[in-house]
Image (cartoon, grey):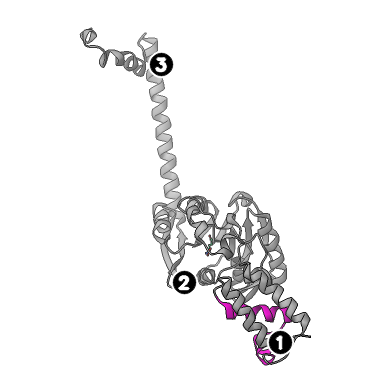
């Protein structure tokens, strides 16, 4: 039997966590105790001066040791609350971030104004964004991810949260939804620049899936693909809601501005005053106008090509070499040696 009190083991854990470089040592030491003993914070404070039995000490310091290896708290406890909803976590799937709550809120506000409440959650990960919209805005959500681990965790979370009418599909971005259209597309895609990944905290760099973080050389790979693909999957009056990195608002809004399919482009900040969300409305009329213009341009180009072909054939019949061939034959003489230049 040890003679340690709960307060003693908490203090010892805080010291160990501090030496390991953990950020919030008090919060984590207490959270691990609560998790081990299945108690809430209030019960924990009441037991502050109680003795800690041997089993508790052993179990507790095992958990603390894991956290000292910088395993994220949420992977140890298996849960992260998102918009007040408990979301299960698992190694191999991105842990929901507090920053993303503002993305869910922005989407919720838009959705409440929309008639069509079908949502496509692209790169759904744990399913947190889509589940929040299903529960808070009565959305009918299709969850999509390329990671099998994400798909299976999303399914678990949907079942645990009692979300009805959800669909979960596996594949690369829009691939698994074929020609389907939605009232909203929401996504928190991987957006970290490849070269920045080694500089992230050990909790992220060593424990979280690279495939959920790596946005390519400039971090924007997924925005390019989502913005190009979204118009074909949005219904009239639909909206696009994207989580972005704190320094990506300019680049992402520029991409949307360059696409005639989007209007009313807005940037929203998170609680830390970082740019975090970009929203846009799908402008179906403008998109159709642009599609028509492109089709006409293509038609014109085809017509011109046909005409040129006809001309070439005519010239061949007259026994002339086609214009390009003539030019090619003339070329060596044109810039050729001085002696021949008169010929
Ligand atoms: N915001 C996440 C982080 O802190 C990155 C998530 C992402 O790339 N979508 O690492």
Q: Which residues are magenta?
A: 24-47
Residue 4, which numbered label?
1
Horizontal and vertical percent for residue 74? Answer: 64, 71
Residue matched to label 3: 313
For marks 3 and 2, the one nearer the N-term is 2
When the figure is inspected, residue 48 is found, relative to residue 172, above or below; the finding is: below
Q: Is residue 216 visible?
A: yes
Labels 3 and 1 touching (C-beta < 8 A): no
Labels 3 and 2 touching (C-beta < 8 A): no
When the figure is inspected, residue 226 is found, relative to residue 267, above or below; the finding is: above
Residues packed near mark 3 inside 10 Å, few (<14), some (14 to 19) or many (20 plus) = some
Q: Is residue 131 visible?
A: no
Residues packed near mark 1 inside 10 Å, few (<14), some (14 to 19) or many (20 plus) = some
For marks 3 and 1, the one nearer the N-term is 1
Horizontal and vertical percent for residue 277? Answer: 47, 65
Along the line of sight, the residue nearer the viewer: 192 or 228: 192
Which residue is found at the position 69% from the left and 63% from the top?
Answer: 153
Q: Magenta-highlighted stretch: main secondary structure? A: helix
Which residue is found at the position 58% from the left and 81% from the top?
Answer: 26
Image quadrant for the C terminus?
A: top left
Residue matched to label 2: 270
Along the line of sight, the residue nearer the viewer: 162 or 3: 3
Image quadrant for the N terminus?
A: bottom right
Residues under labels 3 and 1: Cα distance? 98 Å
Residue 204 colored magenta? no
Choose top left, top right, bottom left or bottom right for residue 151: bottom right
Q: Is residue 55 left or right of residue 123?
A: right
Residue 45 colored magenta? yes
When the figure is inspected, residue 47 is found, relative to residue 66, above or below; the finding is: below
């Amino acid at each position: 039997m040890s003679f340690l009190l709960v307060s003693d083991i908490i203090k010892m854990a805080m010291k160990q966590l501090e030496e390991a470089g953990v950020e919030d040592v008090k919060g984590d030491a207490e959270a691990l105790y609560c998790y081990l003993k299945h108690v809430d914070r209030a019960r924990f404070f009441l037991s502050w001066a109680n003795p800690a039995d041997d089993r508790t000490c052993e179990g507790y310091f095992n958990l603390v040791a894991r956290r000292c290896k910088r395993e994220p708290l949420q992977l140890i406890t298996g849960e992260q609350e998102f918009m007040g909803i408990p979301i299960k976590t698992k190694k191999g799937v991105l842990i929901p971030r507090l920053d993303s709550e503002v993305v869910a809120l922005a989407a919720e506000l838009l959705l409440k104004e929309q008639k069509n409440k079908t949502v496509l959650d692209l790169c759904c990960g744990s399913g947190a964004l889509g589940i929040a919209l299903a529960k808070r805005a009565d959305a009918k959500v299709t969850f999509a991810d390329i990671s099998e681990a994400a798909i299976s965790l999303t399914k678990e979370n949907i079942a645990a949260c009692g979300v009805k009418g959800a669909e979960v599909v596996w594949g690369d971005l829009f691939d698994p939804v074929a020609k389907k259209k939605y009232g909203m597309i929401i996504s928190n895609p991987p957006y970290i620049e490849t070269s920045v990944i080694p500089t992230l905290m050990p909790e992220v760099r060593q424990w979280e899936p690279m495939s959920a973080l790596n946005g390519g050389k400039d971090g924007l790979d997924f925005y390019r693909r989502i913005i190009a693909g979204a118009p074909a999957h949005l219904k009239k009056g639909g909206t696009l809601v994207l989580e972005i990195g704190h320094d990506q608002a300019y680049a992402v809004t520029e991409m949307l501005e360059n696409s005639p399919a989007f209007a009313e482009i807005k940037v929203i900040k998170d609680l830390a005053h970082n740019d975090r969300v970009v929203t846009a409305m799908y402008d179906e009329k403008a998109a159709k106008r642009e599609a028509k213009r492109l089709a006409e341009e293509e038609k014109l180009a085809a017509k011109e090509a046909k005409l040129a072909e006809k001309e070439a054939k005519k010239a061949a019949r007259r026994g002339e070499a086609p214009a390009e061939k003539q030019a090619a034959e003339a070329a060596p003489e044109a810039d050729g040696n001085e002696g021949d230049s008169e010929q």
